[in-house]
Image (cartoon, rainbow, N blue to C red):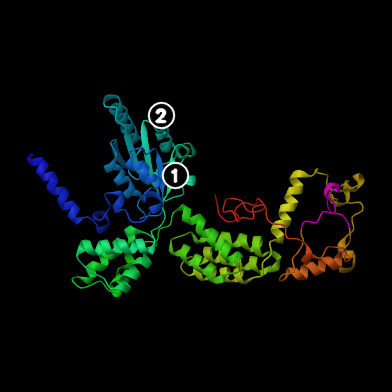
Amino acid sequence: MTGEDLFSGAAADRLASRAPLAARLRPRTLDDIVGQRHLVGPGAPLRALIESDRLTSAILWGPPGTGKTTLATVVATATAKRFVPLSAVSAGVKDVREVVEGARRLIGEQGRGTILFLDEVHRFNRSQQDALLPSVEEGLLVLIGATTENPFFEVNAPLLSRSTLWRLEPLTDDDLAEVVARGLAAEGSTAEPDAVAALVGLADGDARAVLTTLEVALALAGSRPVTLEDVERARHTRLQHYGEDDHYDQVSALIKSIRGSDPDAGLYWLARMLESGEDARFIARRLVILASEDVGEADPLALVVADAAARAVEFVGLPEAQLNLAQAVVHLACAPKSNRVTVALGRAQRDVREAPRGDVPTHLRDAHYRSAATIGHGQGYEYPHDHPDAYVDQEYRPAAVAGTRYYEPSDRGHEAVVAERLRRLRGGDAADAADVPQEPPADASGSTGPTGPTGVAGSEAEA
């Protein structure tokens, strides 16, 4: 062994001894992995592929600290192929091309394949991902991409279609307790039971987070067992993880909680989003939309409150404006609910798209300009204020859609007053609004896509 080799080996040993606890405890075999039994337990599909060295291109998708990089490390030790790790944070197309060229030489000279592990694959833009596609498609590279973000949003569809998607789940409390036990054993220390419970509770299924917090708590404890107070003092090392997938999922949870008239759940998701750094203006926009979509005329003040909260976000800003947002969440959650405005708009839009488009009736046409009366504009129009209750029974739509009822108010909140007024004005011939079946929105599942139940942009999330 040369002096240079000895020096390199000594440096590697010193770096390993100084590495963070999470790095030192990283599993080296499938049996060492904590959690993800559905993927790497006995007889599990991913385990079978790794052990037989038949793993094809794959996307590992899961929250931070669930074992994506660990799985890649295990693959590196189990495969006969050349294993090349890259991070999309620092690598670019040039690095990918170098790996491709090396893979082509290797398979030509030795018949040996190449696995490219690309951590944070979602950080690659579309053109960078496209550079990988030909090599993956022809089998020159086996790509293992790791991402915390929803790959259906962040990975090019052609690349995703040529890869197997493996979803990693947050670790259970029992899994995290096992991770803590391993960490304590590695450091030759102990912890009180309530300290372990607190560590597990703070981690949100993230093994790396629990070990990071434990490492700080161990430093605070010194030679004595780790206490609950040590964990509380160390907890500020934990960061809130909030990716694009969380962005959509949590705003969906906020909207559904408010729609479900649960102010406590609404406040929880509001607090969680704000704590994670969500844009307060985005939250405010969602509340303004919800005020009309899910409350509507059941409480007309809801839109005023939501709009006022949105204005407060712009005028006051955070952190104070979080109180305005909280008030809006509570008001909207506690308000009577009606989606009849949403349904009515959907019905009208359907007629606009599908029914014949008749001309504006002559009596409704603009009669204010010179000579309009000579072509019949405005003839037959009756001015409502000339009649009792400022109402006159006349048709305001083209013949093809005349008489179609779009808006059927519910019997909830202020909308019951609206329903009674419409029944009276219509001479009692209208159907009883309370008995009208509530037509579900076009997307009754509560989709979090860029359009709402009526196709109005921005129902629950922004594209």
Q: Is residue 285 magenta?
A: no
Q: Are marks 2 and 1 in contact (CB under 8 Å)?
A: no
* Element carrying mark 1: strand
Residue farthest toward the front in the current orientation of the protein? 43
Front residue (pair 282, 12): 12
Residue 353 at x, y percent in the picture: 74, 44
Whether residue 88 can be seen here: no
Which residues lie in the magenta part?
394-406
Magenta stretch, overall SS:
loop
Residue farthest toward the top in the current orientation of the protein? 108
Residue 346 at x, y percent in the picture: 71, 53
Q: Which mark, by number, is residue 138?
A: 2
Badge 1: few (under 14), some or many (20 or more) residues near its Cα, within 10 Å? some
Q: Quadrant of residue 128?
A: top left
Q: Which mark, by number, is residue 165?
A: 1
Q: Quadrant of residue 171?
A: bottom left
Q: Measured along the vertical axis of the image, is residue 386 above or below residue 96?
A: below
Identify the residue at image location x=68%, y=61%: 339
Q: Sequence order check: which comes first, mark 2 or mark 1?
A: 2
* Element carrying mark 2: loop
Q: Measured along the vertical axis of the image, is residue 165 above or below residue 190?
A: above
Identify the residue at image location x=31%, y=69%: 196
Where does the N terminus fall, quadrant-wise? top left
Residue 84 shown left or right of residue 307 in the figure:
left
Residue 198 shown left or right of residue 433 in the figure:
left
Front residue (pair 355, 58): 58
Q: Quadrant of residue 208?
A: bottom left
Q: Which amino acid type is shown beneath numbered disc 1?
A: Leu
Residue 445 at x, y percent in the picture: 61, 55
